[in-house]
Image: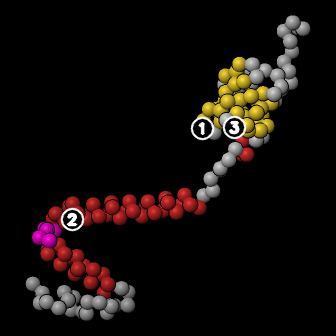
Amino acid sequence: MIASGAHPRGTAAAGSDANGSGLLDTLGSALSSLVEALGLGWDLFLDLILPTLIVAVGGAFLSVWLWRRSRRTSSSIGTDHFTGQIVTVKSAEGTHGQAFVEGSWWSLHSNGRPLRNEERVRVRAVDGLFLIVEPLTAEPPNEEET
């Protein structure tokens, strides 16, 4: 056992080394004293408490990093970014239809001719929860004319 106040390496405990080992020695001594004061064995400390602390501290750093990253990236708020996009009509009934756009279903409305299934259309505007679209292709030939 080492006498109180004596350091195991025979050097002063704090700040004696230019590379910072004095701080590590101080932290090690404090940790050793804590483990002994709590009556924990080193086995329990190394097998259970230390891994738990590492996971908790790592989780805290990860949380802070994700939070800071979310503050840096800009979010697309509003519907202006839909204008000009080309989307595919998934279901159509007359001048109304539906399309899956950027992860969600949107209702479509065409001011021109009726929409068709699997037709590609361009978004011209957003009106509430409707995308106002226009077909990319000209009017299909009338079946009576062919």
Q: Secondary structure at mark 3?
A: loop
Q: Residue at x 65, y 50 (%)?
A: 76
Snapshot colouring? secondary structure
User: 43 left or right of 22?
Assistant: left
Quickly name the residue at label 1.
103
Quickly name the residue at label 2.
46
User: 100 left or right of 96?
Assistant: left
- Residue 14 percent across, percent down from the top left: 29, 90
Q: CA distance from mark 1 to mark 2?
A: 47 Å
User: 26 left or right of 33?
Assistant: right
Q: CA distance from mark 3 to mark 1?
A: 18 Å
Q: Nearer the viewer, residue 41 or 136?
A: 136
In the image, is residue 3 above or below residue 91? below
In the image, is residue 39 above or below residue 71? below
Residue 117 appears in the figure: no
Name the amino acid type tagged 3: Gly
Picture quarter containing residue 135? top right
In the image, is residue 140 above or below residue 120? above
* Mark 3 vs mark 1: in front: 3
The stretch in magenta equals 38-42
Mark 3 or mark 2, which is nearer the start of the sequence? 2
Q: Residue at x 26, y 89 (%)?
A: 13
Position of the C terminus by quadrant: top right
Quickly name the residue at label 3.
128
